[in-house]
Image (cartoon, coloured by chain):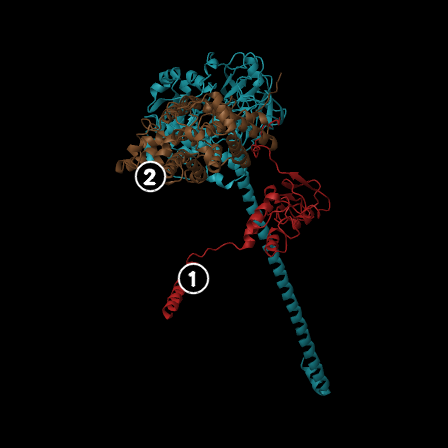
Amino acid sequence: MTMASSRQIELAREAGKRIHHFHGGLRLRHNKKISCLDPVERPPLPEVLVVPLLQHAGDIAEPLVHVGDTVLKGQPIGLCQPCAAVHSPVSGMVEAIEDRPMSHPSGQKGPCVVISPDGKEQWIELKPLSNWLDADPDSLITQIQSCGLAGLGGAVFPTHAKMREGRNRKTHTLILNGVECEPYISCDEMLMREQPDKIILGARVLRRVLGAEHVVIAIEDQMGSVQRSLTGSAEFADSENISVVKVPKIYPEGGERQLVQVLTGLEVPAGGRPSDLGLMCQNVATAAAVAEAITEGKPLIERYITVTGNGISHPRNYLALFGTPVSHLVECCGGYTGDVARLVVGGPMMGYPLESDSAPVVKASNCVLALSDQDIAAPQPEMPCIRCGECARVCPAMLLPQQLHLQIRNELWKPLEEYGLSECIECGCCDFVCPSHIPLVDWFRYGKGELRKQALESEAVEVARKRFEDREARLLRIKQERAQKMARRKQVLKDKTAQQERIQASIQRAENRSRSKPEGQSKGARDDT
Amino acid sequence: MTRSFQTGGAPHMPPQTTVAKVMLQVLMALIPGVLAYTWFFGPGILVQITLATIFALLFESLMLRWRRRPLKPFINDYSAVVTAVLFALCIPPLAPWWISCIAMLFAIVFAKHLYGGLGQNVFNPAMVAYVVVLISFPQAMTSWLPPVALAEHSLGLADSLATIFTGNIPVPGGWDVVTQATPLDTLKTGVEAGRMVPEIRNSPLFGDYGGRGWEWIANWFALGGLFLLYKRVISWQVPVAVIGTVLLISLPFWLLDPDSNPFPLQHVFSGAIVLAAFFIATDPVSGCVSDRGRLIFGAGVGIITLLIRRWGGYPDGVAFAVLLMNMAAPLIDRYTRPRIYGE
Amino acid sequence: MMLSILILTALGLVFGLGLGWAALRFHVDSDPVVERIDALLPQTQCGQCGYPGCRPYAEAISAEEADINQCPPGGEAGIRALADLLGREPKPLNPENGEETSKTVVLIDESRCIGCTLCIQACPVDAIVGAAKLMHTVIKSECTGCDLCLPPCPVDCIDIVEVDTRLPRWHRPRPQAIPLRVL
């Protein structure tokens, strides 16, 4: 891992003053307009909500409710100590806690809390921190954690953990990421248009928690109305040191590392985080959720989500509760049109496909994309790599995807470290340009998982060796101790026999003596006693 | 009502290009050069291209069948055709038909499929084929014709066909009368005989820079190369490195001793430098991966070509240069791994 | 004659001293071969190789008493690594020692356990905790899947279970190529 120099940290303070470039990337067709025509609404309540207990990076949350319990809107229903909490999105009754499809790239089922809403929408008692300007930053972080906040850009890293780290690392600039570089997705754009006050308020809260000085809100250069709405908001007028910066639209500019490079011209050190440069990136939607959590005390139970694609009759954005089945959202959009070949959560570059539309909306879902046959590639036969180097040209992490692919395919795990597999951001640019149609990112994800598994295994092997050796040593010690004890006992026994013999011998001697003595003397002795 | 869908990996978009498209673009870029070639040297080249293509596809399908690989995607990727056309452009236009046959046998079977097929070959198949026949059949491979404008007898399509298939040229006096040394040959033998370069260049074989006719073919190849650059099928590093090195290295020699060293542009526009710079050394499979590696690779091709032209036994050395650099490519790649983001 | 002998002797001395000095100066402490073999073994300590643990097996290999194909948990990959290290030809796993299987752990059915402590004594890595007449349990993260605790159990309360590869331990499987149809 390389370290950032203090000069780099100084340069990072200039974030947003000039626009820089990053290596590679793609210019993709936008396809965003179709979902931006209608204002965002809440869809009607679905019949049943399925809230997965695994919605963040980290472990599965422990359920806090039982089947048959009545829950209130915003009541915590899942707890996972180091990660964020899960809350009930509605008031109603817990119908089941069971394994269900849970909107995860693996397609696996997992534990979900199934809640049937009672329609009363009765909130649990909320505890806002209305005087947040005077509040201690640690209590703000605690509030963020208890409200279950996680990065809404897609990585769903628990916000409180990120903020705590940023606070400890002396962050000077907060970057709000409003760059939705993937085609089709427009939920952040709609949020910035409709809720600018919340975003800026959230930015101020986050800035206070971090102890940072500046806030830079990065948006795409085609979002003219967004800039107007952000800078025109009342909150913006009251705030200092907040700037809105337009960046050119090149995929994957919304990636944290790429955005940092575009705003500062600096690279985040390999293996490090933006906080090494004194920067912190948060999604705009996270900032809005922070504002709600602090000033209203509302836990994170809903988010903006784009329902779009050529397979949707009436594409638009919704403010959907977590646990809402995707099928319900699609129905509210007028249903599918014609043949939908693939249903994707996320964008077309990095999203994952759903096997069934019964999967719920979760904290990470920013978009539901229904694609027709023309939109996606028919399964292409994979050709051998011709080493054309296109993948390396477009790679924003400046890797050599073709070399990495060969190494993973041939299970050469050692050189992968040198070639920087861990720096891959899985953006899919290499996949898109590959003339041989090699699923490069799939290979990289497999390789990363395999490396992680191997690291865990070798750790386990070391533990097993240590435990085995310790046990052997212990058994040996016990054996030796036992042997010593035995030896000692034998010695003692021997000593005893010897003593007895000595006693016997002295008795013998005494007897002999008394026998040999005259009668009178012994009488006399008796008289003495 | 829930519905089920098919899954598949990201990205959920049709791919931008295919191997076949890339190869087709290369073939298209060769068209102007080939037309110019036909214009200056007669229709023999077209026959050679056809022959080489037929043999290449034949061996390709045999090898695919033998290796139990699907025929369709691999025949349709045009990679064998590119190999065949590049090879045909290197040989004398009236070379006998079996030259193509033997050459394609080596290109497709030995240089390509025995190394593992498309994408696995260490050496450029067209250059392997060319070098094999050049060394094995020097007579047939040096029977070059003068440009049509200089020839006493111009051969039509029928005559060219007859020559290629029978080996006898339908001209009074036979081969000895018709063939003529290439400009590079003339230059080499001339310099070795102690004549001055300007004096040698007075021969009608030479044009403004390179050989008469050859320089224009090179121009048209360069145009095709620019098309490939524009389409980003090839990267600029290799052509710039090859041509730049040739110019840079021959310039001081020419400045010091213009009598025994040709003008730098003459180096570029004679022989196969331009063709190699844009079409042969840019072969991604046998070349380098990184940008820096490609610069080194191209420079190596330029330097070795000049060395062979000046001191070697052959008038031109592009093919040898490319093969030697192919050999060095993995090593160059190893030492030119680009810096990773944040490193 | 005399001179050349002297020169050669002197040279020999100088070079010999140089070599000796270099040997001391650049001395590399390499692990004894037993350590390096042991490092390649899976440390399951299952004894399927016929030796009471991985280290004894490593000692036997280095003494050329045991072959390199006797470790089923290590599998083909393990044999290859050993062959690499020792400069031998890899060979298939000896079926007498067992078959290569996916990694498992054991689980004690706590309702049936009678607290006899026999399994605790059998476990080579102390991965079972418990006391006499009290229920025992397996520390899942420490269990190597050697199955040595199964035979001594008098009530057959120990089960073999697959290692959980579900979320969040899931990772993406190896991509499968779309099969090409041979014409």
Q: Along the line of sight, which residue is nearer the eye, A115 or A454? A: A454
Residue C177, quarter of picture = top right
The chain shown in brown is which?
Answer: B
Which quarter of the rendering shows the C terminus of chain B?
Answer: top left
Left or right placement of residue B309 versus residue A391 in this view: left
Residue B193 numbered tag = 2
> Which of the two discs, 1 and 2, sits closer to the camera?
2
Task: Identify the residue under disc 1.
Answer: C20
Q: Look at the picture and state if A413 lies above or below A29.
A: below
Are the residues flagged by discs 1 and 2 from a single subunit?
no
Question: How many labels were placed on the picture?
Answer: 2
Q: Residue furthest front?
A: B172
Residue C33, quarter of picture = bottom right
SS of the residue at dot 1? Answer: helix
The chain shown in red is which?
Answer: C
Q: Colour of chain A?
A: cyan
Name the kind of residue labelled 1 in the image.
Gly
Name the kind of residue labelled 2 in the image.
Ala
Crowd around label 1: few <14 · some 14–19 · many ≥20 (10 Å): few
Q: Look at the picture and state if C89 lies above or below A79.
A: below
Q: Position of residue A145 (x, y in %)?
A: 48, 30
Q: Position of residue A476 (x, y in %)?
A: 61, 57
Q: Position of residue A516 (x, y in %)?
A: 72, 86
SS of the residue at dot 2? Answer: loop
Q: Position of residue B192 (x, y in %)?
A: 34, 39
Q: Name the subunit of mark 2.
A: B
Residue A104 seen in the figure: no
Crowd around label 2: few <14 · some 14–19 · many ≥20 (10 Å): few
Residue A461 seen in the figure: yes
Q: Along the line of sight, which residue is nearer the eye, C30 or A11? A: C30
